[in-house]
Image (tube, rainbow, N blue to C red):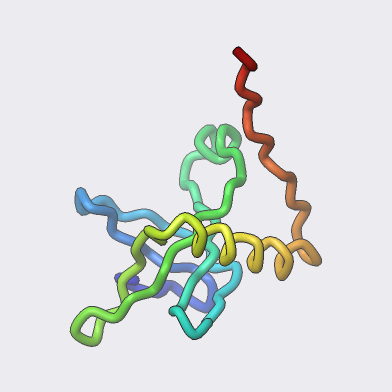
Amino acid sequence: MSEEYGNNIVSVLDDEGNEHQFELLDAIETDEGRYVALLPIYTEAEAAIEDDGELVILEVVNDNGDDLLVPIEDDDMFETIAAAFEERLSEYYEINEIEEPETPLS
């Protein structure tokens, strides 16, 4: 995390050096690591309207004293952490399941 703007707003730099702001909705610490659930914040109304409302779930890693947010590489770990956030946040937010497209039978 590059900077914090108040209690629940974080600014994150992507790989290309672009700054993005997110609302920090929740954080989980497990034996495997620390994880955060973020929701993008948009400065333009059109971008906010077009957003699908999908959470951004990242791992917090410490690099020489700095906390960095990185993608969760392990698919099983991602699913486990996503399910934990979904359960915890469902009390406060309406969470819709994204259905996987069906593959046609050959």
Q: Quadrant of the C terminus?
A: top right
Q: Is residue 87 left or right of residue 7?
A: right
Residue 24 image offset from top left, x and y in percent: 53, 68
Which residue is more in the foreground, 4 or 56?
Answer: 56
Residue 80 image offset from top left, x and y in percent: 59, 64
Q: Is residue 95 left or right of residue 62?
A: right
Furthest-front residue in this view: 106
Which residue is more in the foreground, 79 or 62?
Answer: 79
Q: Residue at x 34, y 63 (%)?
A: 70
Residue 61 image offset from top left, x and y in percent: 33, 76
Q: Residue at x 37, y 58 (%)?
A: 73
Which residue is more in the foreground, 12 or 84?
Answer: 84
Q: Quadrant of the N terminus?
A: bottom left
The number of discs equals 0
Which residue is more in the foreground, 87 or 75?
Answer: 75
Q: Residue at x 74, y 51 (%)?
A: 95
Furthest-top residue in this view: 106
Q: Which image quadrant is residue 62 in? A: bottom left
Q: Which image quadrant is residue 10 in? A: bottom left
Q: Residue at x 68, y 36 (%)?
A: 99
Residue 55 image offset from top left, x and y in percent: 57, 53
